[in-house]
Image (cartoon, rainbow, N blue to C red):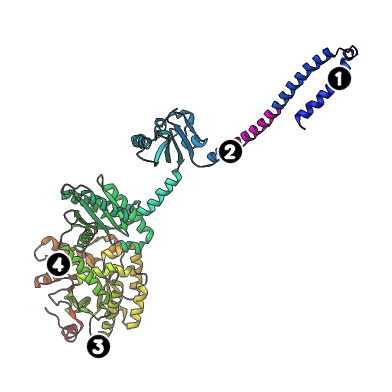
């Protein structure tokens, strides 16, 4: 209802009251007095009406204000809720008033109460001491307008207890004159994210098994060192060492990958423990390790390190109560002497490592230009071997073994020869190790056994008199799980009597896994095949294993025979070996006899069988048949 209309009704009602209250005035007809009273009441009511009108207006305005306040309060609640629900702590520093404000998450994220922060200096105090100067300069650059936006990841001391990773972002608000008035920003705890990133980087740049840098990180580090010193290389020399474990594949194949992995972990730890300060150790794949030695002063530093490494790695390493035997070949190249490029340096280190292997393993070798020929030659040999069987380039030769006591032909040792269409005649000493390293020896070895058994059957069918033909076995062949089955199939297929077959093994073959070797060799003996232990005296030569091996023959290495007529000590050693073999019921064959005097000495010692150039060099099957089998000729 309209306010004025309400007031008029009230006045009308008041007039009625007046007529009642002041009847005497009306009776006395004191109208003047009546109107004076009425006029005063009218003024009162007019003032009243005006007051009521203002009150109603204020009430309406008050209602509008309350609605606006409610909207603002609701917006503030939403804003605060938004701030509190985000993972960031939002903060602001007024550079004029020095007032600091932040969202409620500031304490939860940083571990500090926002009431204790009043300036940039207070925030910088949270930063680790070594980073404070950098962070403070970054904020100064932001305030001065050198950068428009600031962002960094760094560690802060959380509540004075532990260091955690945080992401800090900020920017400046400026007045119309471009002067910074406020810094607004956010801070976010990223320790979990950072740890995850570190794990990702570790997977990307580290070898998980050995916890060492991988090939990618090593190459990146080497490239950085080369770039750093390329302009002043005269003042810095770096060495790259390429370490390759000898016979690691044999360990993996015989003992299993678990032992192989444990061996690699042990080797990595030994290498890391040996390194000088600043050196980088990296496993780059399989059993291969790289080492980067920075700022080398003298080559003798590298030599001393290599000697120390080999003394540690060339020993038995105990894994799960088993002793695993390994050794290492090391190739070394020097920056800048051997090259200015990463790929060239790594190639040179690889070349030097193969040179060390070819020279007998378990040694180290510095790169030189002449070594490049070795790598090219090795590649050519391996490529040629892959096609040698198909191209009919392999041939078996035979060297006679003579029983000098009974003056008769005891048998032969079968020896592989390779006449390559491209490379010509290649020495077994050169191509056999490559065949073993490449794994080709398995297929070649099966071919050898089959060819010798066929030749053996042919000669026996002709009635030739001899005992056995000996076939050399590689350790790679014995580690093949199918070896025993393949051997049985070949014997059956060639129809050879197993008693005419002898297999020659070396000490290094069975020492890799002694128990497994004993089991396999025993199974071979049960087939009727005899077993000879070749190169006796050059390996472990332990009586403890000799008595357990199911062997029938002991072969004395040529290195002992060479000097028995000039060196009394070696003569005594050979005499002792022969006596030992006779005592335990083994036949003895002396390899490499070349002079009549050697023959006489060996005969005097009781050695009944001899193999060497004195009687004959290795000959083809046709030559053997013509010279020895048909005539039964023996040179005395």
Q: Distance between the residues labelled 1 and 4?
A: 156 Å
Q: Distance between the residues labelled 3 and 1?
A: 163 Å
- Whether residue 467 is visible, yes or no, is yes
Lateral position of residue 353 relative to residue 566, left or right: right
Residue with the most extreme bottom position: 462
The numbered dot on residue 17 is 1
Q: Distance between the residues labelled 1 and 2?
A: 55 Å
Q: Residue at x 45, y 45 (%)?
A: 192
Task: Give the mark toward the camera: 3 or 1.
Answer: 1
Q: Residue at x 53, y 39 (%)?
A: 83
Q: Residues within 10 Å of mark 2 (few under 14, many from 20)?
A: few
Q: Are marks 3 and 1 in contact (CB under 8 Å)?
A: no
Residue denoted by label 4 = 561
Q: Is mark 2 on a helix, strand or loop?
A: helix
Q: Where does the image place residue 76, in percent across and percent down from the top left?
A: 57, 36
- The answer to whether residue 463 is above or below residue 272 is below
The numbered dot on residue 75 is 2
Residue with the most extreme right position: 27
Q: What stretch is highlighted in magenta?
A: 55-75
Q: Earlier in the sequence, mark 3 or mark 4?
A: 3
Q: Where does the image place residue 350, in percent across and percent down from the top left?
A: 23, 60
């Amino acid at each position: 209802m309209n306010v004025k209309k309400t007031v008029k009704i009230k006045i009308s009602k008041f007039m009625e009251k007046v007529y009642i209250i002041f009847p005497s005035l009306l009776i006395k007809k004191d109208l003047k007095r009546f109107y004076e009273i009425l006029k005063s009441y009218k003024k009162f009511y007019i003032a009243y009406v005006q007051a009521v009108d203002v009150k109603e207006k204020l009430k309406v305005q008050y209602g509008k204000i309350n609605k606006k306040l409610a909207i603002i309060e609701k917006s503030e609640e939403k804003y605060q809720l938004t701030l509190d629900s985000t993972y960031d702590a939002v903060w602001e520093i007024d550079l004029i008033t020095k007032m600091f404000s932040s969202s409620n998450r500031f304490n939860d994220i940083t571990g500090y109460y926002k009431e204790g922060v009043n300036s940039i200096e207070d925030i910088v105090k949270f930063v680790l001491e070594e980073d404070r100067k950098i962070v403070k300069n970054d904020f100064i650059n932001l305030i001065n307008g050198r950068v428009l936006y600031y962002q960094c990841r760094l560690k802060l001391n959380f509540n004075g207890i532990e260091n955690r990773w945080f992401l800090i972002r900020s920017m400046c608000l400026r007045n119309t004159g471009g002067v910074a008035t406020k810094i607004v920003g956010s801070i976010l705890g990223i320790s979990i994210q950072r740890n995850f990133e570190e794990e990702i980087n570790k997977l990307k740049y580290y070898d998980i098994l050995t916890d060492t840098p991988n090939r990618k990180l090593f190459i990146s580090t080497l490239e950085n060192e080369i770039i750093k010193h390329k302009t002043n290389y005269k003042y810095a020399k770096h060495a790259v060492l390429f370490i390759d474990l000898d016979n690691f594949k044999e360990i993996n194949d015989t003992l299993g990958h678990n032992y192989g992995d444990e061996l690699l972990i042990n080797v990595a730890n030994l290498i890391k423990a040996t390194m000088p300060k600043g050196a980088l150790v990296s496993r780059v794949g399989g059993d291969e390790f790289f080492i980067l030695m920075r700022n080398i002063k003298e080559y003798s530093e590298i030599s001393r390190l290599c000697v120390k490494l080999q003394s540690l790695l060339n020993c038995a390493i105990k894994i799960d109560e088993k002793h695993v035997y390994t050794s290492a070949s090391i190739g070394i190249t020097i920056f800048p002497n051997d090259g200015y490029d990463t790929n060239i340096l790594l190639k040179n280190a690889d070349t030097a490592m193969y040179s060390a292997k070819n020279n007998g393993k378990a040694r180290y070798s510095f790169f030189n230009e002449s070594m490049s020929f070795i790598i090219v030659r090795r590649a050519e040999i391996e490529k040629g071997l892959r096609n040698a069987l198909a191209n009919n380039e392999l041939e078996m030769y035979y060297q006679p073994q003579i029983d000098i006591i009974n003056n008769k032909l005891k048998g032969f040792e079968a020896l592989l020869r390779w006449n390559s269409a491209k490379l010509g005649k290649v020495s077994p000493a050169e191509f056999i190790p490559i065949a073993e390293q490449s794994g080709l020896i398995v297929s070649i070895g099966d071919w050898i056994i089959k060819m010798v058994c066929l030749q053996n059957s042919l000669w026996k069918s002709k009635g030739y008199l001899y005992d056995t033909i000996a076939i050399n076995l590689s350790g790679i062949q014995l580690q093949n799980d199918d070896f025993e089955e393949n051997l049985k199939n070949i014997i059956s297929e060639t129809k050879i009597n197993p008693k005419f077959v002898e297999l020659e093994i070396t000490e290094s073959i069975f020492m890799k896994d002694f128990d497994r070797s004993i089991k396999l060799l025993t199974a071979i003996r049960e087939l009727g095949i005899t077993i000879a232990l070749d190169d006796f005296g050059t390996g472990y030569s332990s009586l403890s294993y000799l008595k357990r091996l199911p062997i029938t023959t002991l072969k004395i290495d040529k290195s002992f025979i060479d000097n028995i007529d000039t060196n009394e000590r070696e003569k005594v050693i050979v005499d002792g070996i022969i006596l030992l073999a006779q005592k335990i019921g083994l036949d003895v064959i002396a390899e490499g006899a070349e002079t009549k005097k050697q023959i006489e000495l060996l005969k005097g010692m009781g050695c009944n069988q001899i193999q060497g150039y004195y009687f004959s060099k290795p000959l083809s099957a046709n030559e053997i048949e013509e010279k020895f089998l048909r005539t039964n000729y023996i040179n005395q």
